[in-house]
Amino acid sequence: MADDTRRPILPSAEHLALLKQGVGVSVASRDAGNLPNLVRAVGHRVEPSGEVTVILSGTDGGGVLANLRANGAIAVVFSQPSTHRTLQVKANRVVITGARAADLETVAQCREAMAAELAAIGFNREFARQLLDAEPGDLVAVRFLPESAFDQTPGPKAGAPLATG
């Protein structure tokens, strides 16, 4: 997506710190009739450019991927289980590829971060590892440059646009 001339929505330092911790990640799309589809991502990362990569099972995310290929509209929610701090990013253009070596490393890092996060609130670390388990050959990377971002933490500010970094 290096040819993209749009100005990226860069997460603030606070939001980047949240994304480096164990967070649950849900990837949503919609079809032509605006019917939603959702899948859990097994990994994610944010590049210095602001580009976001979410990694998901191609099998589990078949409906989401079909919608993304058709219209590019994506919404991704990142939520920390121990605090319920949640942020959402949206875009209307994606690039979908097979998972690369860096993506597999990202998945392993996210799995361990989620295991630590859930262990801190009483869950067995193995639970998180199984929750984010996927066959490497089935993984798909979805890359996009966020066009908007929102605070979705439950409470009075839910839905408010995020200040960016």
Image: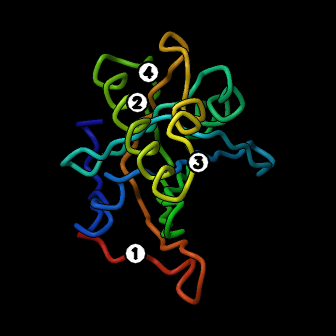
Q: Find the distance from the CA under tag 2 to the CA under tag 1.
A: 26 Å
For this rendering, which residue is in front, 96 or 101? 101
The disc labelled 2 sits on which kind of residue?
Answer: Val
Residue 116 x, y percent position in the rendering: 41, 47
Q: Find the distance from the CA under tag 1 to the CA under tag 3.
A: 18 Å
Residue 85 x, y percent position in the rendering: 48, 69
Query: Residue tagged by mark 4?
Result: 97
Mark 4 or mark 1, earlier in chain: 4
| Secondary element at image label 1 | loop
The disc labelled 1 sits on which kind of residue?
Answer: Leu
Q: Nearer the viewer, mark 2 or mark 1?
A: 2
> As displayed, is residue 61 above or below residue 72?
above
Mark 4 or mark 3, earlier in chain: 3
Q: Nearer the viewer, mark 1 or mark 3?
A: 3
| Secondary element at image label 4 | strand
Q: Residue furthest top?
A: 137
Residue 26 image label: 3
Residue 70 x, y percent position in the rendering: 63, 33
Task: Specify whether 134 is left or right of 116.
Answer: right
Few, some or many residues within 10 Å of mark 1 (<14, 14–19, 20+): some
| Secondary element at image label 2 | helix
Q: Nearer the viewer, mark 3 or mark 2?
A: 2
Residue drawn where x is 36% and y is 48% of the image: 145
Q: Find the distance from the CA under tag 3 to the CA under tag 2.
A: 14 Å
Query: Residue tagged by mark 2?
Result: 107
Q: Nearer the viewer, mark 2 or mark 4?
A: 2
Mark 2 or mark 1, earlier in chain: 2
Query: Residue tagged by mark 1?
Result: 162
Q: How many marks?
A: 4
Residue 117 x, y percent position in the rendering: 44, 52
